[in-house]
Image (tube, rainbow, N blue to C red):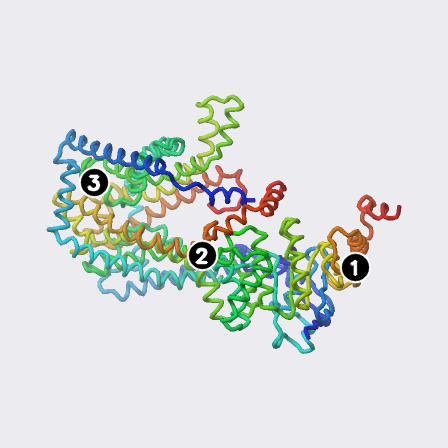
């Protein structure tokens, strides 16, 4: 069972010029239940990525505990990570990039071919298995990165604004694909984004994070059934709730949507 | 995005001067002083292990350097060699501008000449220096010819490539606004090519002065190359070192100081993304 | 952004007869003009000063058949290769060290840049004077002249390593061996081989110089011998033959190796035909259109 529990995480970075420190996380706590898709939503630079890095074991917290599946650390559980940039090995083919993750997990070599074929087909790249990443468009590279995160069939999938650098058309397609795969495999997903509509579309639950130092200021279940439509007005409603929380005194002009809804 | 910049930034080069401390107290400076010190020490140790001053110590070399700069018509010798370098480079750059633009603008000229440029570039300056001395004879024209033969292909390559890379839309724009061919050359083509002409000159210069020194070495009666050859024949390593180091230093100042500054000034309109 | 232009390149028509023949015509014409120009020049100035192309051609054959070309060539080539190999060894350690550690970088950067400014001639003379008339002098000269150049290449290659990739490798459980094999070496290898390509061109020039001043065998010695007896056809014949051998090594050996190691940098192939067609499909076209339409 891949339940994630983050307990009172603290993290500060020394500031380059001067002697001060930058408190990024302050008593940050978060629970993600097994098989749940939780969106971590907040303004850019609020420490969301740091949270993911701590969870993935890339950065050590100054204090606090991380437990996955009830025990500290990852143990036998595996973690897939889809980064903001594709982070592919440009000198390896698409298939070899997926195999890199399989080798890291220690999957037997015999299963590689089948597994890579399966997941490349899932993200619509079956014909590009032997292409080099630089010959693909940005959207395709990001799909390779997504396939790499999924091919190891991780217990937990961490995603750091994976679609924010893509054009909306591609991003929309990938969100559909992601939801399909994740619901099929009951993967626990922690999805970081600054896009409220994206969070509302993807998440079972949304945690709104405040600007630095980061802490969860609002947390609610998304009351929309699945399958969802990205055009659903209910998503806009949720976006407004988030904006009210993060930016309560924003100019009235930008609140036009609310006035219209009231009418 | 901001979250990323919070991470200790390992990829970016550390600033030369850490804030809050004077530059001469930073680690960077001390490490370089240490580096220079250990080179001098290694040089000195090397000079001690070889018998009879086969390898002169740094001090002996420095003394010799000082002596040369003080007494032996240093400046007239350097000026003579520099003059030969300059004459050769002027001829080479003028030829290269004409050839490079012609090759970049006309496919026929390009097909006709590209072979010679590519082959010429791979023939070492040494061969050109020998050929020039043998054909032209022991006079001032020999080093100029040698420089011309060595540097021209290199400079042509730069100008040719950047002429080809020029945006044809720019010419269409000029045509649409009724600018004549001469004006197009003067106002569109040449200004756009100036950075690559300067870059080519810088590359060519690095070769040119070595070729001039070589051809002086092979028989011309004066110049830095002649002095180096004299020292070499007398087995005076300190002399060879002193002459080479001093002239290399002068050329480095010209290359990086003077031309580098010109280059930076010329490309000031470019966003600062690529170095030099 | 580049989706459409790139496709245009991939689907460029195969070269027709005319596009192959036209350059060939110009090249042959260029060669004929150059050779006859040379011939006329030698006639005009005097064949004793500028030997004609035929004389040099004769001498070329003579050098190969009667003047121990193979022996001298092999001894020069051996010096070039040993020097280059030693320089590569030094430069690989130094370059990677400088790329990874700021301290090492600060210690050596002045040396490397300074060494780069010293001309090959200086190193050749120094090596000959320190070592004396011996086959080891050219090797030392090559190491002194070429190491800074190679170090510079590998140093820059290492600095350009994307450190985020190490984080990625860590997340996906890659061990040290896997990281070295899959992340570090493939990323640095192109700059090592690219450096070797530059280094080769420099090392044979330096070797010939050093041989010219202080060795009694090798191509440089032969060139000097011919210069001393004022035989321009000999100088030209030796220089041409040697340049030919070095060009063969560069274009026949190192360039293919380099392009093989960097084939991942090229956009486009290898794609299957289905993949190429798929790229043309409506969906990708639409994506490409929306992208190129946007300002960002």
Circle 2 sits on which residue? C157
Query: Which of C240 and B51 lies nearest the eye of the viewer?
Result: C240
- Number of residues whose C-alpha sits closer than 10 Å to that of mark 2, classed few (under 14), some (14–19) or many (20 or more): many
Disc on res. C183 = none
Circle 3 sits on which residue? B131
**Number of numbered discs:** 3
Q: Position of residue B119 (x, y in %)?
A: 29, 42
Residue extending furthest toward the bottom: A71
Q: Position of residue A145 (x, y in %)?
A: 58, 59
Give me the C-alpha separation between circle 3 and circle 1: 85 Å
Query: Is C27 on the left or on the right of C101, as rendered?
Result: left
- Number of residues whose C-alpha sits closer than 10 Å to that of mark 1, classed few (under 14), some (14–19) or many (20 or more): some
- Number of residues whose C-alpha sits closer than 10 Å to that of mark 3, classed few (under 14), some (14–19) or many (20 or more): many
- Look at the numbered discs 3 and 1 and tell me whether their residues touch, using CB distance below 8 Å: no
User: In the image, which is nearer the foreground, mark 3 or mark 1?
Assistant: 1
Give above or below for B194 relative to C279: above
Q: Position of residue A153 (x, y in %)?
A: 61, 68
Circle 1 sits on which residue? A224
């Amino acid at each position: 069972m891949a339940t994630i529990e983050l307990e009172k995480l603290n993290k500060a970075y020394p500031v380059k010029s001067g002697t001060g420190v930058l408190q990024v996380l302050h008593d940050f706590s978060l629970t993600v239940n097994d098989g749940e898709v939780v969106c971590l939503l907040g303004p850019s630079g609020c420490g969301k990525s740091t949270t993911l890095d701590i969870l993935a074991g890339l950065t050590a917290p100054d204090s606090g505990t991380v437990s996955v599946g009830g025990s500290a650390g990852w143990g036998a559980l595996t973690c897939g990570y889809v980064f903001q940039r594709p982070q592919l090995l440009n000198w390896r083919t698409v298939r070899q990039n997926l195999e890199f993750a399989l080798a890291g997990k220690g999957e037997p070599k015999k299963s590689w071919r089948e597994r890579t074929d399966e997941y490349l087909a899932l993200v619509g790249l079956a014909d590009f298995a032997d292409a080099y990443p630089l010959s693909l468009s940005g959207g395709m590279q990001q799909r390779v990165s997504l396939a790499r995160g999924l091919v190891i069939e991780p217990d937990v999938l961490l995603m750091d604004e994976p679609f924010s650098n893509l054009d909306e058309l591609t991003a929309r397609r990938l969100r559909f694909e992601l939801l399909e795969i994740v619901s099929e495999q009951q993967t626990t997903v922690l999805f970081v984004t600054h896009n409220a509509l994206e969070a509302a579309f993807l998440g079972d639950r949304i945690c709104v994070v405040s600007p630095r130092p980061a802490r969860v200021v609002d947390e609610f279940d998304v009351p929309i059934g699945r399958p969802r439509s990205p055009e659903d007005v209910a998503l806009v409603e949720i976006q407004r709730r988030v904006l009210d929380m993060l930016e309560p005194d924003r100019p009235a002009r930008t609140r036009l949507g609310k006035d219209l809804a009231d009418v | 995005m901001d979250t990323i910049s919070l991470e200790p930034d390992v990829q970016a080069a550390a600033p030369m001067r850490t804030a809050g401390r004077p530059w001469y107290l930073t680690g960077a400076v001390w490490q370089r002083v240490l580096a220079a010190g250990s080179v001098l020490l290694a040089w000195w140790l090397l000079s001690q292990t070889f018998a009879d001053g086969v390898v002169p110590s740094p001090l002996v070399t420095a003394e010799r350097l000082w002596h040369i700069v003080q007494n032996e018509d240093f400046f007239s010798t350097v000026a003579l060699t520099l003059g030969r370098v300059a004459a050769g480079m002027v001829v080479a750059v003028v030829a290269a501008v004409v050839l490079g633009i012609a090759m970049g603008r006309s496919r026929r000229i390009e097909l006709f000449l590209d072979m010679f440029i590519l082959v010429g570039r791979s023939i070492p300056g040494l061969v050109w220096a020998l050929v020039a001395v043998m054909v032209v004879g022991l006079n001032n024209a020999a080093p100029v010819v040698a420089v011309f033969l060595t540097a021209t292909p290199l400079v042509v390559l730069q100008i040719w490539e950047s002429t080809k890379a020029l945006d044809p839309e720019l010419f269409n724009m000029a045509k649409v606004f009724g600018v004549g061919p001469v004006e197009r050359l003067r106002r569109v083509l040449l200004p756009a090519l100036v950075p690559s002409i300067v870059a080519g000159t810088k590359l060519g210069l690095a070769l040119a002065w070595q070729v001039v020194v070589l051809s002086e070495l092979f028989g011309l009666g004066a110049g830095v190359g002649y002095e180096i050859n004299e020292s070499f024949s007398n087995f005076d390593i300190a002399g060879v070192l002193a002459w080479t180091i001093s002239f290399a230093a002068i050329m480095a100042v010209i290359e990086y100081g003077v031309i580098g500054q010109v280059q930076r000034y010329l490309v000031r309109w470019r966003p600062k993304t690529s170095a030099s | 952004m580049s989706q459409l232009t790139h496709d245009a390149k991939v689907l460029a028509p195969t070269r027709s007869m005319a596009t192959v023949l036209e350059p060939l015509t110009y090249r042959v014409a260029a060669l004929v003009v150059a050779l006859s120009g040379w011939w006329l020049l030698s006639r005009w100035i005097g064949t004793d000063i500028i030997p004609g192309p035929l004389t040099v051609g004769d001498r070329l054959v003579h050098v190969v058949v009667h003047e121990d070309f193979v022996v001298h060539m092999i001894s020069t080539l051996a010096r070039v290769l040993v020097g280059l190999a030693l320089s590569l060894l030094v430069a690989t350690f130094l370059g990677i060290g400088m790329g990874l550690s700021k301290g090492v970088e600060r210690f050596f950067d002045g040396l490397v840049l300074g060494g780069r400014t010293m001309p090959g001639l200086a190193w050749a003379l120094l090596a000959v004077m320190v070592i004396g008339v011996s086959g080891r002098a050219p090797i030392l000269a090559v190491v002194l002249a070429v190491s800074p150049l190679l170090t510079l290449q590998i140093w820059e290659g290492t600095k350009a390593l994307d450190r985020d990739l190490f984080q990625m490798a860590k997340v996906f459980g890659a061990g040290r061996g896997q990281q070295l094999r899959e992340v570090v070496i493939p990323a640095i290898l192109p700059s090592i081989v690219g450096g070797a390509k530059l280094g080769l061109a420099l090392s044979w020039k330096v070797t010939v110089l050093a041989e010219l001043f202080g060795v009694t065998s090798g191509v440089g010695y032969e060139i000097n011998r011919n210069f001393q007896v004022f035989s321009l056809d000999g100088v030209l014949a030796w220089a041409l033959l040697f340049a030919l051998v070095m060009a063969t090594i560069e274009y026949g050996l190192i360039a293919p190796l380099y392009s093989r190691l960097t084939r991942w940098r090229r956009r486009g192939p290898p794609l299957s035909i289905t993949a190429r067609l798929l790229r043309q499909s409506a969906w990708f076209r639409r994506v490409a259109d929306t992208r190129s339409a946007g300002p960002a």
